[in-house]
Image (cartoon, helix red, strand yellow):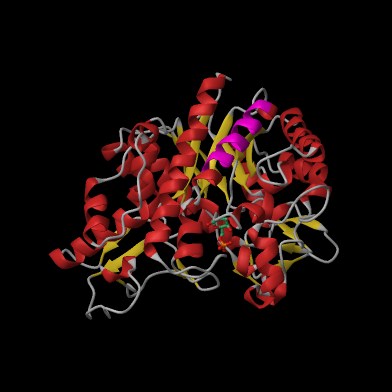
Amino acid sequence: MQYQFPETFWWGSASSAPQTEGDSLSFGKSATIWDHWFQQQPGRFHQQVGPAQTSGFYQHWRDDIALLKQLNHNSFRTSISWARLIPDGTGAVNPQAVSFYNQIIDELLAQGITPFINLFHFDMPLVLQEQGGWENLEVVAAYARYADTCFQLFGDRVKHWFTFNEPIVPVEGGYLYDFHYPNVVDFRRAATVAYHTMLAHAQAVQHYRQRQQGGEIGIILNLTPSYPRSAHPADVKAANVADLMFNRSFLDPALRGSYPEELVALLKRHGQLPACQPGDAELLATGVVDLLGINYYQPRRIKCRDSLVNPESPFMPEWFFDHYEMPGRKMNPYRGWEIYAPGIYDILTRLRESYGNPRCFISENGMGVENEERFAHNGQIADDYRIDFVREHLQWVHRGLAEGSNCLGYHMWTFIDNWSWCNAYKNRYGFVQLDLASQRRSIKKSGEWFARTARENGFSG
Ligand code: BGP
């Protein structure tokens, strides 16, 4: 076989509680910022479909795990909903949530599928957002207690934990670019949220290690390689700032236990540095992860700015660069993201060369497509474009492995078409098609391809 992967390679997919569970305000769960925002501004969501309308994992978990098995998954990621487990954010545990997550974990294990559990996937409990969310250090402390509760309840069986999925996204969406609640536009507050998130991460890592449960703890970062338009020093400088802001702002604390000096100096120069407390540096240093999850969807192409900044405009990363539309780039037009498979290899190479080749895996990669029913053939979605997408990315992962990268697996986003935040059900990502009205599930052609690839531990050509 041309592309053979290591025997122990993780084949699977990723999902999250808020995007799959449904029953978003029942069985003891309290509201998250998503439930609240949807109630306030339904028009922000594609076809006004909100977080209550999902693939209903809360009800269909047994069937869904059977489908995972059919897809030959040996591992699967989902998240625990903080608002379901601890409805008031800080106090008593909801027993219905404990039984639900126990059932999931036990059933996955019974089917030979290793559970990867993430603790936070953009879903701040509303009651804590009302107290300031990540801007409030008491919320940071509450998160650490929540994390420790999860380790205590489930850590006997779960051996792969993640503190956060894409922690930069709530920063960008909620505090810079207005695509998540609370729709603030304020860089310094965004930087505070980012900083406090990493303090919360480090506290959770400390708790996990204190318990000595024999597993590992990591974080999942969306890494977007920054490619300069040209070798001109102005373009290179601009791409470096984008890299500092969007990659190294989380990658360095997660892998080195501290922030890049260049980033700190830049923010200081512009009066955007968040407040620090004594002991923070020591705390951050303890947050170096055992395992890094890499979400990769698209590259970031950068050029130097063509115009001066409006001095009255809010301070933004884009004060230092412009986005560059490279002629001839291959696009996923539905999501508006460039498809560039070598980017996945560039990330692995960089981790190997500059970050000590950490244990890592591809924790998300995928392609959202609109109106997929038009590709139905004999009742099955013939999503050859998705097969090509995965195959091409895996070829680059394979090359990284051949050169010595410590990449342990590949998880696709996602298992079944799910609710994608403000895009709701516009773009479908799953190996399994979901008919939202009937909740009927049907495996797409890509699901069959993936099942075969996982079984054979590789593919030809
Ligand atoms: C990642 C998130 C996922 C998922 C995916 C697809 O950023 O971790 O939750 O949603 O992207 O993106 P989108 O839903 O925005 O199309």
Displayed-image quarter of ligand 1: bottom right
Tell me what residue is drawn at x 68 percent, y 29 percent: 154
Question: Residue 235 in the image: x percent, y percent?
Answer: 20, 66
Q: Residue at x 36, y 41 (%)?
A: 277
Among the 4 quarters of the image, the one containing residue 110: top right
Name the quadrant containing residue 324.
Answer: bottom left
196 with respect to 110 (left or right): left
Q: Residue at x 57, y 34 (%)?
A: 161
The answer to whether 234 is drawn above or below residue 153 in the figure is below
Any part of residue 220 in sight = yes
Q: Residue furthest left?
A: 233
**Magenta segment boundaries in residue numbering:** 140-152
User: In the image, is 288 to the left or to the right of 379?
Assistant: left
Q: Which image quarter: residue 378?
A: bottom right
Of 405 and 271, which appears nearest the observer? Answer: 271
Is residue 90 shown in magenta? Answer: no
Q: How many marks?
A: 0
Q: Residue farthest to the right?
A: 438
**Dominant SS type (magenta):** helix
> Can you give x and y, in whole percent of width and height, for residue 47 in the image?
70, 76
Q: Please tell me whether residue 80 is drawn above or below residue 223 in the rendered image.
A: above
Residue 431 visible in this rendered orientation of the protein: no
Residue 196 vs residue 323, the one in the foreground:
196
Q: Is residue 385 toward the left or the right of residue 244 in the image?
A: right
43 w.r.t. 267: above or below: below
* Residue 112: % across, % down: 70, 29
In the displayed structure image, the side of residue 357 where residue 30 appears, left or right: right
Residue 223 screen position, x and y as percent: 41, 51
